[in-house]
Amino acid sequence: MKFRTPEGTRDIPPAQAEVAERWRNTALWQSLEAKVRDCFARFGYEEIRTPIFELTELFHKSSGETSDIVEKEMFSFKGRGEKAESFSLRPELTPGTIRAVLEDSLLEKKSFWKLWYMGPAFRGEAPQAGRFRQFTQLGVEAVGSADPLIDAETMILFAEILKSAGVAAWELRINSIGCGACRGGYREALRAAVTPELPKYCDNCRRRVERNVFRILDCKVPDCVALSSRLPSAIDHTCAACRGHMEAVEGALKGAGTPYKVDPRIVRGLDYYTRTVFEFSSSSLGAQNALCGGGRYDTLVRDMGGPDVGSVGFAAGVERILLAMEQGAAAKPPDFFAVAIRPELRAPLFEAVNRLRRTGLSGDMDFEGRSVKSQFRQANRSGARYALVLGPEEAAQGKVKIKNMLKEGEERAVSLDEAAAVLREGVRS
Ligand code: AMP
């Protein structure tokens, strides 16, 4: 019997020369992860890690009962033991992050935290290009500030991540969905406008009118999109304070030179958003063109039992960023590849390889009993700048031969210490 990955999941193998899906290689992932970590550090964000599963109730409370991910996309299972609680694989990382902030009393130690995370998320969606059941989210949560500048900062930061990843074709759309004070009026205005035409909307939308009318705005069914384009905009119903907030966010984005568009259709699918909401998308992706979504959530921390503080964050799909990247990445070549001229010299060569590795150099040798010719071919293919050769003559003198693979004919016998120095020089130059 042949085993396969579960539907909607993918392996990420090491880089290979010829592959159909360029994004599926760990060299590319590692290079993106390093760039992303650098961006987070430059913007003053610190990493937080939380479990990949949480109590199901956490997601009901935070993401919202009517959100798609809670309604129909969670992988849930019963815990063991007497309590037999229900747990769910995390469909997003914000709820766990806020739970951790409160559980670890972080806000008592410092009133404002800039946190980042990167890790797997799980949703039982119908798999398609760019849509998986296990995918990877990177994101930030800036917890404890109502400042519109921090809304702008999260967007500027994600634009910076895209720039360093080499994704040029992207678009940022922002909107304000108001606060507790003005959202009620907008909800009524929406209901009043939707009701006469309700039979023309899809089943999902008809169901949503009562529970969460805002969700009609992000329905992707073409007929619903056409109908809802005529509905009133949130921005026209926001209070003076929310309008002021939005103007400050826009001013900061303009000041930073981050291009954006105001799009009244951006409402985001989760319950906890207030005021600023935004999405990054890329025209180089297909139907699943969303790269990143985020926004402000001024009531979530309080609703989860914490203090009444404002927060803002985003989550982006790492696979989507990799799919949108224009450049690939090759695995970093080792500093050397070691070749044994005779089989009995493999053991001393193995010792030499490990001594060199202990000095911080990277290198490898053959473990398949290959011929000398084939070992040199392997050395070539590895991309190493130097081959380290151990023949009977060198072994008798307690030396090794180093051969510059990039310069024909440049080779000499040296002690292992000298070899380490030459290799290190080669690494630096
Ligand atoms: P959301 O909170 O649903 O807006 O998700 C944030 C980001 O995660 C999206 O913009 C996508 O880039 C990514 N994402 C969401 N769902 C999936 C999925 N099923 N497969 C791959 N990426 C996803």
Image (cartoon, helix red, strand yellow):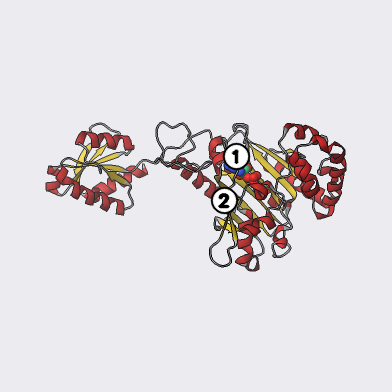
In which quadrant of the rendered view does residue 105 lie?
A: bottom right
The disc label shown at residue 126, or none: 1
Q: Could you say which is closer to the camera, residue 323 or residue 304?
A: 304
Q: Residue at x 17, y 47 (%)?
A: 399
In which quadrant of the rendered view does residue 317 lie?
A: top right
Q: Residues within 10 Å of mark 2 (few under 14, many from 20)?
A: many
Q: Amino acid at mark 2?
A: Phe
Specify whether residue 158 is in view: no
Q: Are marks 2 and 1 in contact (CB under 8 Å)?
A: no
Q: Residue at x 57, y 49 (%)?
A: 121
Q: Quadrant of the N terminus?
A: top left
Name the mark nearer the viewer: 2 or 1.
1
Q: Position of residue 386 (x, y in %)?
A: 28, 40
Q: Residue at x 16, y 43 (%)?
A: 343
Specify whether residue 208 is in view: yes
Q: Could you say which is closer to the camera, residue 65 or residue 378?
A: 65
Horizontal side of 86 relative to 353 (left or right) equals: right
Ligand 1 image-quadrant field: top right
Q: Amino acid at mark 1?
A: Ala
Q: Quadrant of the C terminus?
A: top left
Residue 401, placed above or below residue 57: above
Marks 2 and 1, Cα distance to the nearest angstrom?
32 Å
Q: Residues within 10 Å of mark 1 (few under 14, many from 20)?
A: few
Q: Position of residue 243 (x, y in %)?
A: 81, 48
Query: Sequence-wise, which precedes: disc 2 or disc 1?
Result: 2
Residue 55, placed above or below residue 118: below
The disc label shown at residue 40, or none: 2
Q: Please tell me whether mark 1 sits on a helix, a strand or a loop.
A: loop
Horizontal side of 177 relative to 315 (left or right) equals: right
Q: Position of residue 285 (x, y in %)?
A: 59, 33
Residue 142, placed above or below residue 12: below
